[in-house]
Amino acid sequence: MKQPGSRDLSIDYLRTTLTLMVLGHHSSLAYTTFAHFDKQHMFRSTAPVVDVTRWVFFDYAENFNDVFFMSLMFFVSGLFVYPALRRHGTFGFMRDRLLRLGLPFVFAVVFLMPIAYYASWQLTGRSTGFVDFYKRLAEGGFAAGPPWFVWLLLFFDLILALLLIPLQRWMPLAERSVTTLREHAFATFAIVLFLTALVYLPLLSRYGFGAWTAFLTSPFSFQISRIGLYALWFVFGFLIGAPGIAKGLLARDGSLARHWRLWILRCILAYNALVLIPRWPLVRQLLSSTGPLEAVLWVISCVASCFGFLALFRGIELTSRPWMNSLSRSAYVMYLVHYVYITWTQRLMLDRPIHASIKFLFVFLTTVLLSWLTAQVVLRIPKLKTIL
């Protein structure tokens, strides 16, 4: 991860905002009305820690995040792939990604996730100590937890780098085509919407919303219905970033950035349509099942939110802030370590007679602070600083 000043401020701040949204998302899952904890199979629970205090607003808020933010994370990650490939070469790029993504993933899965999930294991009533839990986890296959994003991003990076070897001669044409999108934001939205539906809806219909599986073996887990979705948005980011983000869809003077208010409005309307329309009594009377309608509205909301956030961060004037730059530099480490702080802080607050909103704020702010402090320590170690 580079210093904020060496990359576009708007993309760095967008990436940081998405990271904070991940922390907020995981902080809220203990307090949604649909949360449940399975003592017999804790990994089938909706969250490692589930509290008795709930707030329906968290259903609305966490679902807003869930619809789009990981797709946009893959998009942002894809933006800098081609510049890095040109700078390092194919095998230099692959070696760099294995170092920057592979090693942190292994460390997180082998050391951090067991600590995080031990807070959950204690709640099953079968805890005989951390060592016993660690042995059980190792024998059954380590759980990836939130670092699933890191291994899947690494996988996409390596596959794309290899595919580009025979396709390299087509890249100048792709770059020229991408630059024409500067004034065609809505047409691009329509095309991406169609492609998103094409890769997501068939898998959703076949496997359902919540099914996860492992690639070859644990802990290389992924959500089956979304694997095509994430691959599409990663490739989309790769193409948009190939000629430089200032030359195409994300141009500061392009139609997407100029009309950022309209794109944010579309984002809000699309998500509320997803929440409200399938629940209208008339719609329920007309349709035997609202599942297909919800799936289509989900896709529209996903794409509208991604475009809305891109338009917002490219369209508004951002001023460099030291505190935001510090968060930006720390974002990767914060993502890697945050789950430990979330599960144990939620465990600390468990079943206390405090409103869910207060618990959430305590968990979220504590997690942000401790994750940031951890990053400050880690990034002062020279060898780790070069990796992270």
Image: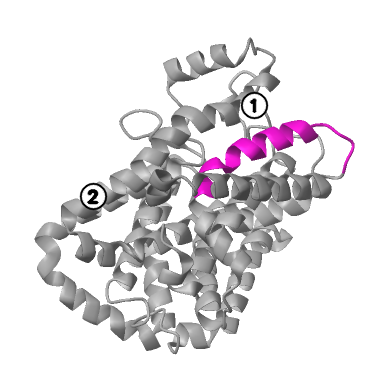
Q: Which secondary structure lies at badge 2?
A: helix
Question: Hey, what amino acid is under mark 1?
Answer: Ser
Q: Earlier in the sequence, mark 2 or mark 1?
A: 2
Using a 10 Å C-alpha cutoff, classify the residue at mark 1 as few (fewer than 14 neighbours), some (14 to 19) or many (20 or more). many
- Asked where in the image residue 20 lies, by quadrant, the reply is bottom right
Whole-percent x, y for residue 331 in the image: 52, 55
Residue beneath disc 1: 120
Whole-percent x, y for residue 167 in the image: 13, 63
State which mark lies toward you, 2 or 1.
2
- Asked where in the image residue 322 lies, by quadrant, the reply is bottom right
Depth check: give the residue in front, 67 or 81: 81
Depth check: give the residue in front, 267 or 260: 260
Name the chief secondary structure element in magenta: helix
The question of residue 346 being in magenta is answered with: yes
Residue 3: mark in rendering: none
Tell me: 30 left or right of 292: right
Residue drawn where x is 55% and y is 45% of the image: 377
Tell me: 318 left or right of 249: right
Residue beneath disc 2: 94
Question: Hey, what amino acid is under mark 2?
Answer: Met
Using a 10 Å C-alpha cutoff, classify the residue at mark 2 as few (fewer than 14 neighbours), some (14 to 19) or many (20 or more). many
Residue drawn where x is 22% and y is 64% of the image: 87
State the extent of the magenta-drawn residues as a range: 333-354
Task: Work out whether residue 287 can be spotted.
Answer: no
Task: Work out whether residue 367 can be spotted.
Answer: yes
